[in-house]
Image: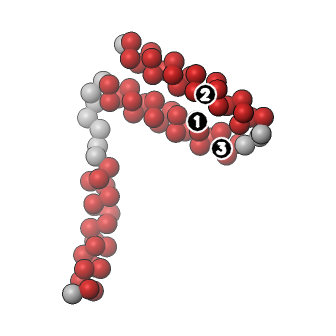
Amino acid sequence: MGVIVSVLIIATLAGLIELPQLMRKQQIAEIWVFLSLLIIGSVLCILQFERVKLPNPMEWITYVYQPVSRFVFGILK
């Protein structure tokens, strides 16, 4: 429980430090990207702490690029 609260406090502090600068410069796209990445990172950190089984992104990359790899190696033979 303490780690979850710590992650939320750190994420909040990061937002409080960075968002005013972005808002002053009216960088709307950067605000959305920053908040999206901050939320995704915080959620993944909490899930990792809770030992939730997360999928390995390498499996997705292999699934997508394996047909391309076979095609390229077939051409090069």
Residue 18 lies, in percent from the top left, at 65, 31
Secondary element at tag 2: helix
Q: Which residue is mark 3?
A: 30
Left or right relative to 66: residue 42? right
Q: Which residue is mark 2?
A: 15
Q: For the residue marked with disc 2, what is the amino acid?
A: Gly
Secondary element at tag 3: helix
Q: Residues within 10 Å of mark 2 (few under 14, many from 20)?
A: some
**Relative to 13, residue 56 above or below:** below
**Relative to 62, residue 18 above or below:** above
**Relative to 62, residue 53 above or below:** above
Q: Identify the residue at image location x=23%, y=83%.
A: 74
Q: Residues within 10 Å of mark 3 (few under 14, many from 20)?
A: few
Q: Which numbered disc covers residue 54?
A: none
Q: CA distance from mark 3 to mark 2?
A: 12 Å
Q: For the residue marked with disc 3, what is the amino acid?
A: Glu
